[in-house]
Image: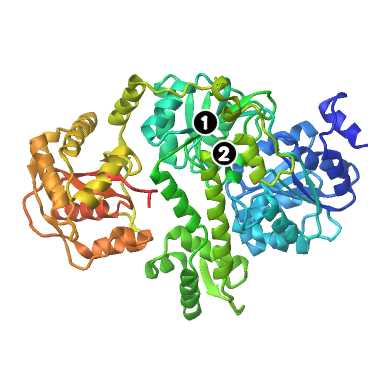
Amino acid sequence: MYLQSLQEVFGPEATFREGQDKAIEQLLNKKRVLVVQKTGWGKSLVYFLTTNILRSQGEGVTLIISPLLALTRNQIDSTRKYDLVADCINNQINKTLTEKVEVIERCNRGECDVLFITPEQLQNDSFIDLISQLRVGLFVVDEAHCISDWGHDFRPDYRRIHQLLQILPENIPVLATTATANDRVIKDVTKQLGDCEVIRGDLQRESLHLHKLYLPTAEEKYAWIAKNINRLQGSGIIYATTIRECERLAMWLRQNAVDARAYYGRLNEDDKIELENRLQNNQIKVLVSTIALGMGYDKENISFVIHYYTPKSVVEHYQQIGRAGRGIDQAVCVLLYGGEDENRINEHFIYHSFPKQEQIDQVLSYLSQNDEVKMLTLEQVMNIKSTTLKQILKLLLIEGFIGKSGASYFRTLKPYTSQRKYYNSVINIKVQEYNELLEFQRTADCQMAYLTKALDDPNTRPCMKCSTCLGEAWDFTDDSLSHDDMKQVLAFFAKNYITIEPRRKSMLTNKKLTFIHEEGLALSYYHEQLGQQARRGKYELNLFTDLFVRTSAYKLRRFFSDKGYNISEVIIIPIPSNRRPELVPRFAQRLANTLKCNYANILAKRPNEPEQKSLLNTSLQEQSIREHLYIKDQINLDNHHILLVDDFVDSKWTFTVAAELLGEMYDDIKVTPFALADTSGSD
């Protein structure tokens, strides 16, 4: 019966891959099943074909929890070939409870076969109540490693799945799927889902040709990508860490006549859909993407995946290269690794993957003493990073230690038990897994075999296709970089502007600022060569060399000329520092001399100011700079253009408050900020 259903969708020659028919049979017998199979095996086929059969038997809808919007859109498109009607609930499409109720009612009327929801919906108790009214025939947890604290992409919202399981009838079949689970994650997932049949297959990807290359600087990575991108057939994905890196790398490729676009979560939905469709239809060479285009994105003929950065684990690396080579015989996956800052950033994210116990205690203590507290209030009274604070609140909500009413949080009566030992054990495992990936960079063993062995695959074997196995016979890429290759990148970096976008609203008052500075300029990113030289200049030499004066003057002349301003008419004002009182003023004075413009050292800071980087959220950063920065000398600056100069920029509050002070003091002025390095995302 199952084979007939398969052939009705895929044609008379279609056959099941090993394990697919077994999974379907278990589900039709109302069992709980965990499928751990390599990407491209056909996990979605199992739940869509099972849905087809269950719907023909009069069963309810298939409810699928899916972690990413791009993945959800991709899967909704896939349902059409199974002659299924799909809908979804997420905060982008149906924001109000009324809209969500309408979707549930359509499902219960039989107008929908498959309903996708994002895990974030499970934060809301009213949504859990709403789902309890849905007639469910099959419950699917896609990318099930997200359930596990031990998984490489743990999502706290997934922990509320157990609440859904409690309100669903016991005889509802449950399917959990993933390609990236080692023994430890499998054990954790099966424990949370209950008694499960585990169907586990061979994880080796026969179509993938893996390569790894040590390139310690951004400049070398850019040069290598430009040289090799057109050697790689078809279309593909380059994974980068930050939005700005995606944008800049895509711009670099376009300047090299490569059709490249940046993709990330903050794009509006229409733009994301357009880019996904262009990649799907081979209308673009490459998407330079954050992990927003990661799990489960299904395009059969992705021909290459390049990692511009080092992932945080072998599992994450395997997950992302799994986008390639699903329906084609050959695809190339390249890991470009190197640089001390890359390791420092990864280790920072690992050690901060869970909040510190003292931070959790601080939040609980405050909520115990205060009723109905909003997030903004917590930010203003606690030196906790906003993202960490949100994580703490989410974890405490999921476990029932706090509650939420509207936008306010309150302490519940449930006694709190410390999670310090547990969180530390998870972090220790993540450190081990990162070290495992660092060893992957160094190993002389087969690259595919190393990955599958790390995933506890009992069928591990040499692939005979990676650059390690092939040795000198590897010819998919040209790894040599000439002087001309590097020269082009350096010229691009010199011409490319790293802009400082103005803040427009106070975090303390939630009101528009009285004065907003112009778009500013940073000379470099902190993690790049010039940025690291700036770091040494600040922390080791207490001096910025003539190199910074020359390159800053060159960049500023171009930047101001492009804006239609005359750089020689500006007045340079340094940002003060009580810790290094001469460092920035000396540099700013030399810069003014080179640019032949005026200089005025009129700003000062009151004593005992904490370092901005020691303040972990934006409210405290703004508050501190407002309390300490002031104008010490009043000179006539009316009708002038001011260039504010500082060493590093991160939160932008120093520039924002300095500009506002000057704007309130003087009439008809413009203020442009300039920093030697942009450190945002580096600390």
Residue depicted at x 47% and y 61%: 388
How many marks the image carries: the answer is 2
Q: Give the structural element (helix, strand or loop) at label 1.
A: strand
Viewer-nearest residue: 565 or 208: 208
Residue depicted at x 52% and y 70%: 409
Q: Is residue 322 visible?
A: no
Q: Is residue 81 visible?
A: yes
Instruction: State the scheme by which the image is colored.
Output: rainbow
Viewer-nearest residue: 285 or 268: 285
Q: Is residue 394 left or right of residue 559?
A: right
Residue 178 in the image, given as x and y percentages of width and height? 70, 45
**Residues at marks 2 and 1, CA–CA distance in whole angstroms:** 9 Å
Rendered view: 625 above or below 485:
below
Q: Is residue 527 left or right of residue 577?
A: right
Three-letter amino acid code at the position of disc 2: Leu
Query: Among all residues in the image, which is located at the extreme front?
Result: 444
Q: Is residue 636 left or right of residue 502?
A: left
Q: Which mark is residue 136?
A: none
Rendered view: 576 above or below 561:
below
Crowd rating for badge 2 (residues with CA inside 10 Å; few <14, some 14–19, many 20+): many
Q: Are circles 2 and 1 on residues that touch, CB within 8 Å?
A: yes
Residue 334 in the image, given as x and y percentages of width and height? 53, 31
Viewer-nearest residue: 566 or 145: 145
Q: Give the structural element (helix, strand or loop) at label 2.
A: helix
Q: Which residue does the numbered mark 2 point to in the structure image? A: 293
Q: Is residue 319 left or right of residue 246?
A: right
Q: Quadrant of residue 609?
A: bottom left
Assign the N terminus to one quadrant of the image: top right
Q: Which residue does the numbered mark 1 point to in the structure image? A: 287
Three-letter amino acid code at the position of disc 1: Leu
Residue 158 in the image, given as x and y percentages of width and height? 65, 56
